[in-house]
Amino acid sequence: MAGVDVKKLVDELLSADKTLEGVPNWEQSSNIQEYRLTFPVFIDGRSTEAFVEINAYPNAPSLRFRILFIIEKCVWRIDHTEYERHINPIDTFNNIQPSSFLCPHYHSWEDNRRYCTKSSLPKRLMIGRPLPENIKQFDAAFRWFCGKINISQLPSGMVELPLRTTLL
């Protein structure tokens, strides 16, 4: 992304109508508890450098997954987990509430673009917000995520989380 205004590039990419291409194929990551699925992102039938990655943890004690929109680095993410505390940066406590929480949440570009420079993306998405309370399952979270970043909806049930592989 050398020589381009990174903020403007991400803003334009997120506002454009996009599609996901490919056939879902879960693969085990280097972390044996994690499975990964990636979809390339297309605009007007043309491939972009962006992709959507879904990480699933089928043997976790409760429903756990992440959905990421990546352009070299992650710029939008859902963390669906009930046992990882998120604490927002102290300088955001007055305008981002709650400042700390232990529930499924998301990290939007709109909240985190302030950590981007003209030539580089933020290393981490530091500001998070709780997911809307009506989003309890993967399908609803995936559809909400796609709607937030202008990705055409895939057919219902096309992407399903992998099944548990252990009894406990």
Image (spheres, rainbow, N blue to C red):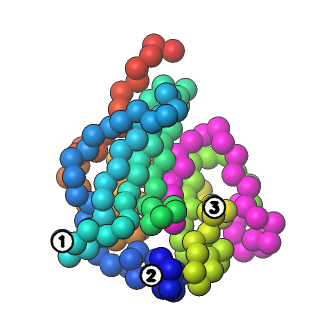
Amino acid type, mark 1: Gly
Instruction: For mark 2, give the secondary structure.
Output: helix
* Residue 143 drawn in magenta: no
* Position of 8 relative to 142 (above/below): below
Q: What residue did someone put label 1 on?
A: 45
Amino acid type, mark 3: Arg
Image quadrant assignment for residue 152: bottom left
Q: Are marks 3 and 1 in contact (CB under 8 Å)?
A: no
Is residue 157 shown to the viewer in this render? yes
Q: Earlier in the sequence, mark 1 or mark 2?
A: 2
Q: Residue furthest front?
A: 2
Residue lying at 45% horizontally and 13% vertically, measured from the top left:
167
Q: What residue did someone put label 2 on?
A: 9
Which residue occupies the foreground of this view, 68 or 139? 68
The residue segment tinted magenta is 75-98
Which mark is drawn over residue 124? Answer: 3
Measured Cα–Cα span from mark 2 to mark 3: 18 Å
